[in-house]
Image (cartoon, helix red, strand yellow):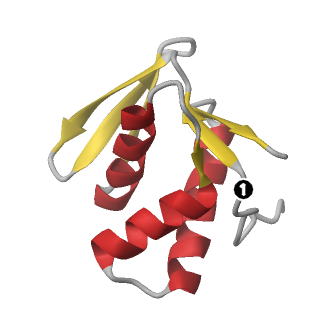
Amino acid sequence: MERIATTLPPALEIASDPEVVGCTLGEGSALLNLRTNIYYSLNAVGAFVWDRLVEAGAERVTFAALVAAVREAYDAPVDVVEADIARLVTDLEAAGLVRCTRG
């Protein structure tokens, strides 16, 4: 079984893939990968992260900035947020929904 990272480098840069569109769905979001025609759903925190990436447009958002934004919005412990956001970003990248640049 592949081990999923519980943390990522703070300087990791993340951007939404331009071939992915999303919309609000209840408290979360639905994403459609236009290359594969596969839909994905995100919970409220995942939707919050996705919105930060979309708002950034062509600019990339660092892992550290996402962690800080989630901590501020949800008042959660840093270790929990880092692990959860690392899993989310890893899953989004594996599904081709985001692009990560490792420095």
Horizontal and vertical percent for residue 52?
39, 45
What's the residue type where badge 1 is placed?
A: Ala
At a point 52% along the width and 24% down the height, the residue shown is: 58
**Quarter of the image holding residue 32?**
top left
At a point 45% along the width and 27% down the height, the residue shown is: 57
Decide: is 80 above or below 73.
below
Q: Nearer the viewer, residue 38 or 85?
A: 85
Horizontal and vertical percent for residue 42?
37, 48
Q: Quadrant of the N terminus?
A: bottom right
Mark 1 surroundings within 10 Å by alpha-carbon count, few (fewer than 14), some (14 through 19), many (20 or more): some
Q: Is residue 85 left or right of residue 30?
A: right
At a point 63% along the width and 30% down the height, the residue shown is: 96
Please state the total of marks drawn on the protein image. 1
Decide: is 97 above or below 32.
below
Instruction: Residue under label 1, please give it.
Output: 11
SS label for mark 1: loop
Q: Is residue 3 left or right of residue 11?
A: right
**Quarter of the image holding residue 95?**
top right
Q: Is residue 4 left or right of residue 36?
A: right
Horizontal and vertical percent for residue 47?
33, 49
- Residue that lies at the very extreme toward the left in this rendered image: 26
Q: Is residue 1 left or right of residue 95?
A: right
Horizontal and vertical percent for residue 102?
81, 45
